[in-house]
Each structure stands twice: as C-alpha cells, then as structure tokens.
Image (spheres, rainbow, N blue to C red):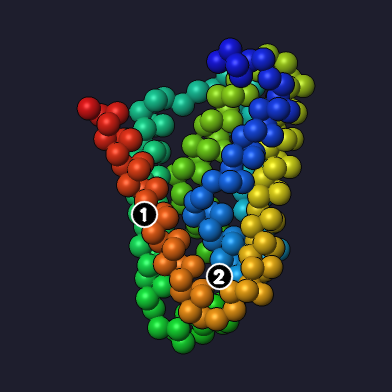
C-alpha cells in the first residue's frame, strides 16, 4: 500500500481508468460490437457510462462513510463473475452460429426500449462490474485521507470511463468500415466467445486455488 499512498487521487484514478480501457470483458465487447453492427452507439455508451458513474459515486460515498463489505460477499461476487463470463461466452458462441438472417432481423428490428434493457442487463447483471467499479474504488478511496483526493479520484475515473465507453462504441463504428460482412461479424462473435471463455477459465483456476 506504500506505493499507492505516494500517489495522488488523480493519479490513482487515471491508472485504474486506463486499466479498464485496455481490459477485455462483456461490457467493452458489447460496446465494440454495437459500433460494428451500426447500432445505437451513443445511447449504448451513454447508458454504460451513466451506470459506471453511479457505481463510482456510490463507492466514494461508501468510503466517506467508512462502509466495508464482508469478504464472503466479495468472494460470492467473484464466483458470480465467473458464472457471468461463462454465460456471456455462451451467448457469443450462440450468436456466432445462429443463422445470419435471424441475427440481422433481430438487430434491425430491435426497439429502443429493448436496446436499453439489453445494455442494462449486461452491465448490471455482471457481478464483476460491482467488484471493479464499486468494491475496489471504495477500498482505494477509503485509503485516501483527504476529501480532495477522493474527489480527484472519482473525477479521473469518470473521465476515463467516458473515454472507454464512447471510445469502444465509436471505435466499433470506425472498424465497421472494414468489418462489413456478416461473416466478419460472426468471426468477431466467435472470437469474443473464445476470449471470454479463456478469462472464465483463468478466473476459475484462481478461485479454486484460493480454496486449496
């Protein structure tokens, strides 16, 4: 903790935010895919960023109130994260092997309300979202003695989260100029399933080793 204590709240927030930008997970992959299929990128990114902002604000509030979560709950969330990654990986594989006409019709006919529910379900039903944006930020903010550091920490996280959300969504739109065919999107879904499966396996190994 000595290395962390030597950093300002702004530096810690920027470092954590940068880590979330380069990380691969259901939320980032969803934003990237939405951009590729030319969906409602701005709406998607705005919903995800608003959700992140709510969790970060709650995390800093918990730190200010000296609230902590029992370690058993943290472990439960990590096991829940394993289940979520496995489920999202399965969905990616199913989408990849679904008939092209079925997938395209569903994406084309999706209403705004259905889009919003889909986004919120991916973000809020992923237990690791709470670990990464609530528990870890709360613990880091609690180690900061100055209120100004906590505010800088939260602000840095919010700014980098915006870069992450809108960057992935609109980056997907730019990538769509290259990935235009249904076959290319299917390859993306298949690759997403493989990546999420690999992460799930790694997480399972880590959780099982902690039990040993």
Say the numbered circle drawn on residue 197.
1
Give the image quarter of residue 31: bottom right
Badge 2 local density, few (<14 within 10 Å), some, or many (20+)? few
The answer for how far apart the CA atoms under marks 2 and 1 are is 26 Å
Residue visible at 46% across and 67% down?
189
Determine whether the residue tagged by mark 2 lies in a helix, strand or loop: helix
Position of the N terminus by quadrant: top right
Does residue 43 show up?
no
Mark 2 or 1: in front is: 1
Q: Is residue 163 left or right of residue 22?
A: right
Residue 212 position in % (x across, y down)? 22, 27
Of all residues, the one furthest to the left in this rendering is 212
Of all residues, the one furthest to the front in this rendering is 178
Q: How many marks?
A: 2
Choose between 57 and 102: the one closer to the eye: 102
Does residue 168 show up?
yes
Give the image quarter of residue 111: bottom right
Choose between 184 and 134: the one closer to the eye: 184
Residue visible at 70% across and 24% down?
9
Say the numbered circle drawn on residue 5.
none
Residue 62 position in % (x across, y down)? 59, 27
> Is the residue 29 above or below the residue 178 in the image?
above
Choose between 144 and 168: the one closer to the eye: 168
Badge 1 local density, few (<14 within 10 Å), some, or many (20+)? many
> Is the residue 127 above or below the residue 36 in the image?
above
Q: Check disc 2 and report the residue beneath it.
A: 114
Determine whether the residue tagged by mark 1 lies in a helix, strand or loop: helix
Residue 48 position in % (x across, y down)? 62, 53
Q: Is residue 209 left or right of residue 2?
A: left
Choose between 108 and 120: the one closer to the eye: 108
Residue visible at 54% across and 61% down?
30
């Amino acid at each position: 903790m000595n290395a962390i204590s030597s950093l300002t709240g702004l530096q810690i927030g920027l470092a954590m935010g940068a880590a979330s930008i380069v990380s691969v997970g259901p939320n980032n992959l969803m934003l990237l895919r939405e951009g590729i299929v030319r969906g409602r990128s701005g709406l998607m990114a705005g919903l995800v960023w608003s959700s992140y902002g709510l969790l970060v604000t709650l995390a800093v509030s918990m730190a200010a109130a000296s609230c902590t979560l029992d370690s058993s709950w943290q472990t439960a969330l990590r096991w829940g994260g394993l289940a979520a990654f496995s489920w999202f990986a399965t969905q990616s594989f199913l989408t990849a092997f679904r008939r092209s006409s079925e997938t395209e019709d569903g994406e084309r006919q999706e209403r705004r309300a259905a889009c919003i529910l889909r986004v919120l379900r991916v973000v809020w039903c992923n237990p690791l979202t709470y670990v990464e944006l609530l528990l870890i930020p709360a613990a880091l903010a609690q180690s900061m003695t100055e209120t100004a550091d906590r505010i800088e920490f939260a602000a840095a996280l919010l700014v980098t989260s915006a870069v992450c959300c809108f960057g992935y969504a609109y980056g997907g739109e730019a990538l769509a100029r290259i990935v235009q065919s249904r076959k290319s999107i299917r390859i993306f879904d298949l690759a997403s399933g493989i990546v999420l499966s690999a992460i799930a396996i790694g997480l399972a190994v880590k959780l099982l080793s902690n039990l040993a």
